[in-house]
Amino acid sequence: MKLTLKLFLFLLAGGMVFATAGCKSKKKLAQEAAAKEYAAKVEKAKAELQAILDDEGTMPLAEMERRLNDIKAQNLNDPEVNALIKKVEEKIAKEKERIRMLEEQKNLEKEKKKEVNKYQYINDYFHQIASAKDVLTANARIAEALKLYAGKNVPVLIIISQEAGLPPDYDKPTTIEAYLNYVKDQKRYTNEIFNVKFDEYGQITELELLKK
Amino acid sequence: MKPKIILIALFLISISLSSVAQDQLSPQRKQAIDSLALEKVRDLSKYISLIGDKATEYSEATRVIERAVELFMEGSEVGVSSLSRPDVIYYQVQKYLERLMRLNYNKVDIEWYKIEYVSDLERQPDGTYVGVITIFQRFSGYDIEGGLVYQDVTKKDITVYVKRKETQIAGRMIGFWDVLLGDIRVKETTKN
């Protein structure tokens, strides 16, 4: 009986030691697996972030943002990944700014086109006068064109150069009558309309042209 | 006493340097006034061709003469040469243009070409930019049968003066470049 008890106790102790050792090894394995998984995630994140950085315009901005957000959601907290995230964020911000500016430029061009179209009827007279087949035709067009203006002495200003931060440089101011005759004599009109001022009757009181 | 003099000298130097900087035009603005002066010479070329053209009505020709005169500085002269005489006669601009209108040919063709700067616009102490533009003029005079009776090619130099001025338009100050042409000097006259 004594021997049996001794054997039982021995086996129990042995079993406990074995069980503890097995638990420890499982935890280690789990830790190792987690570390491996983390390392894999870090590597994958680094590769994806680098791919975004290396991309030369083939990846849409939305896709870049989606990938970045996925990576950020993983909270990897790796210094290299964090540095790459910062770089990608900068790249996305730059790209957004570029797109915004492009959009702004497009809108400006659209507005300018609208403006040009709005004043096309003024330009048409200049072109018709410049290309008139003879003086009589040109004079008839001048008489018609003058009806658009508040008077023969309406000032015509021609911008010859414009620089940021400086007021524009003009050619010597002239009057609409003199300018229409100038276009007739020179048989040439190469300016574009920059600004038009009207009175309450819709007649032009000032015309600003831009030398092309 | 000495430090005071040095300070005053430095102050004066800084003022003069800043005014030099203000006077200097950017290449873009300089190019704009270069082109403007060339354009005025081309405008004159067209006016001369219209005035000389016998098909131009008198009323139109006199109007164009007025426009052409406005391009010049007061008192400017135009040289006239001929293959038949060695000397060059200079006329006041108005007189030259009126004479051109009444030339004794049935048809006159005047063409200006190779219009370019021989001396770039240079800033003078008074702020005026002065340059010289050279042109070649081919003059052809025809008789009633349409036969060419006279033709020559004259190389001429035109002095141009460009000055920045200001004027008020509808209560707004406008800075503009006033281009005026000076004398037109004959350099040489050849048959063609």
Image (cartoon, coloured by chain):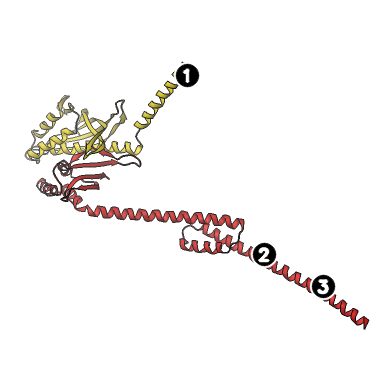
Residues tagged by mark 2 and mark 1 found on one chain of the structure: no
Residue type, numbered disc 1: Pro
The part of the image, by quadrant, that contains residue B51 is top left
Q: Nearer the viewer, residue A86 or A210?
A: A86
Near mark 1 (Cα within 10 A), the count class, few <14, some 14-19 or many ≥20, is: few
Near mark 3 (Cα within 10 A), the count class, few <14, some 14-19 or many ≥20, is: few
Q: Are the residues flagged by discs 3 and 2 in contact, CB closer than 8 Å?
A: no
Q: Which residue is mark 2?
A: A35
The mark total stands at 3
Residue A59 drawn above or below residue A11:
above
The part of the image, by quadrant, that contains residue A153 is top left
Q: Is residue A61 left or right of residue B49?
A: right
Q: Colour of chain B?
A: yellow
Q: Are the residues flagged by discs 2 and 1 in contact, CB closer than 8 Å?
A: no
Q: Residue at x 60, y 56 (%)?
A: A80
- Name the N-terminal-most of marks 3 and 2: 3
Q: Is residue A2 left or right of residue B11?
A: right
Q: Which residue is mark 1?
A: B3
Near mark 2 (Cα within 10 A), the count class, few <14, some 14-19 or many ≥20, is: few
Q: Which residue is mark 3?
A: A17
Q: CA distance from mark 3 to mark 2?
A: 27 Å
Specify the subunit that label 2 lies on. Answer: A
Q: Is residue B61 visible?
A: yes
Specify the subunit that label 1 lies on. Answer: B
Q: Nearer the viewer, residue A127 or A200?
A: A200
Q: Colour of chain A?
A: red
Q: CA distance from mark 1 to mark 3?
A: 96 Å
* Residue A162 point in image, percent of width and height: 31, 42
